[in-house]
Amino acid sequence: MDYIKAFLVGGLICAIGQVLIDRTKLTPARILTAFVVAGVALGGLGLYEPVAEFSGAGASVPLTGFGYLLAKGVREAVNEKGFLGVFTGGLTACAGGIAAAMVFGVVMAALFRARSK
C-alpha cells in the first residue's frame, strides 16, 4: 500500500508540473522554482507534513519535498539557535542530499563523455 500512496501523490505532483508545462508559457526553470517555493510555503504553514507522512517518498522526492525539507530545517534550527537558525537551518537539513547530488554528478561526468548531437 505504501508504494501505491507514493505513486499517487508523486504522480499528482508530476502531473501538475506537466499541466503547467503544457498549458502555460512558464519555462521549466520557473516551474521547478515554483515547486521549491511551494514546498517551502506549505512546509512553513505545516500543510506539507501530513502529505509527506501519508505518502513517504511520493512527497519527499519531488522538488516540493526539497522545499519542505528547507522549511523544516529552518524551523528546527530557529527553535534550537534562535534567529541565527534562519540562515543555517535550511542548508544543514539539505546538506546530505546536496552533497550526494554533487558526488554523483562528478562520478557520472568522469564515467561518461559528453558528445555533440
Image (tube, helix red, strand yellow):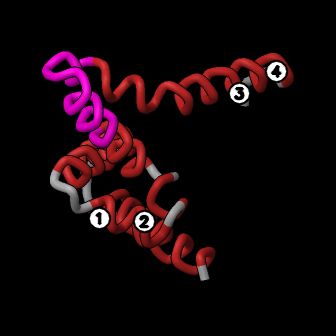
Of callouts 1 and 3, the N-terminal one: 1
Which secondary structure dominates the residues rendered in magenta? helix
Q: Position of residue 3 (x, y in %)?
A: 62, 75
CA gap, disc 4 to disc 2?
A: 40 Å
Circle nearer the viewer, 4 or 2 = 2
Rendered position, 67 above or below 21: above
Q: Which mark is residue 53?
A: 2
Q: Which residue is mark 3?
A: 104
Q: Which amino acid type is shown beneath numbered disc 1?
A: Arg
Q: Quadrant of residue 42?
A: bottom left
CA gap, disc 3 to disc 2?
A: 27 Å
112 in the magenta segment? no
> How many residues crowd around disc 2 within 10 Å: few (fewer than 14), some, or many (20 or more)?
few
CA gap, disc 2 to disc 1?
A: 31 Å
| Residue nearer the viewer, 113 or 61 | 61
The stretch of residues the image draws in magenta is 71-87
76 in the magenta segment? yes
Q: Which residue is mark 4?
A: 113
Q: Which residue is mark 1?
A: 23
Residue occupying image coordinates x 78% and y 21%: 107
Q: Position of residue 10 (x, y in %)?
A: 49, 66
